[in-house]
Image: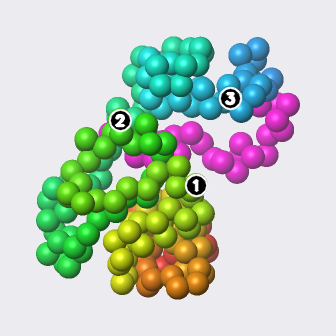
Amino acid sequence: AATAASLRRAAGSAADAARVSLEEHGRRAGARAPRTWEEIRGIFDELYGGTATAVARYGMPPRVHNPRGLCENEAVLLTPALVDALRRLGVSRFVVVTGRSQAEWEAIAARIPLPPGTVVSTEAHGKKPDPAPLRRVVDALDARSFLAVGDTMDDLRMVQEYARLPNARSGVAVVLCPIEEDPSYRSAGAVHF
């Protein structure tokens, strides 16, 4: 199963893509290149959720005709055994802060073995690295401290931004990343991997 990091690696270097002009990206994409944010979002929704889901959920016309969404192949990193191990280490409550929409979250939530009482924050509560969704879940549980496990730079930055808020609770960010991305996370201030 694919992880966000493995999909990023397979897509090639972001630095190389960033050096290409928008005109060149458009030329490479050809006549089907999206021209508006709605078209770009629509293509993403088809790739991620599959065409049928994107059309039903958002009412958009199909463009890429993707029968099976990438979300169906995503690796679920949280297992019941991991939940048990975390509980033995003293982790008593769980939250999810996701960049997904509520509809996207609901489509995959059943695949994740979350304990009862898990508080969830979706993009409706703020977009990472905005600390608002993290503050929402930490406040909802009235947590004295927290451990945030993430796999993107925005996850790390969200915890760092949260720490700068008035009355922020004590928290630690743990980053799950491929070894080749370790230097960039370290330069951004990550210390727990």
Range shown magenta: 1-25
* Lateral position of residue 21 relative to residue 88, left or right: right
Q: Distance between the residues labelled 1 and 3?
A: 18 Å
Q: Residue 107 carries which label?
A: 2
- The verdict on residue 10 being magenta is yes
Mark 2 or mark 1: name the one nearer the start of the chain. Answer: 2
Q: In this view, does 44 lie above or below 192?
A: above
**Which element is circle 3 on?**
helix
Q: Residues within 10 Å of mark 2 (few under 14, many from 20)?
A: some
Q: Quadrant of residue 105?
A: top left
Residue in the picture at 24% in, 54% down? 114
Residue 11: x and y, percent? Answer: 56, 39
Residue 44: x and y, percent? Answer: 57, 31
Task: Name the kind of residue labelled 1 in the image.
Answer: Lys
Q: In this view, does 144 lie above or below 91?
A: below
Report if residue 11 is visible in the image. yes
Q: How far apart are marks 2 and 1 (CA)?
A: 19 Å
Residue that badge 3 annotates = 38
Q: Quadrant of the C terminus?
A: bottom left
- The verdict on residue 37 being magenta is no
State the predominant SS element of the stretch in magenta.
Answer: helix
**Which element is circle 2 on?**
helix
Task: Name the kind of residue labelled 3 in the image.
Answer: Glu
Q: Quadrant of the N terminus?
A: top left
Residue in the picture at 44% in, 84% down? 170
Residue in the picture at 41% in, 72% down? 138
Q: Residues within 10 Å of mark 1 (few under 14, many from 20)?
A: some
Q: In which quarter of the image is residue 96?
A: bottom left
Residue that badge 1 annotates = 127
Mark 3 or mark 2: name the one nearer the start of the chain. Answer: 3
Task: Name the kind of residue labelled 2 in the image.
Answer: Ala
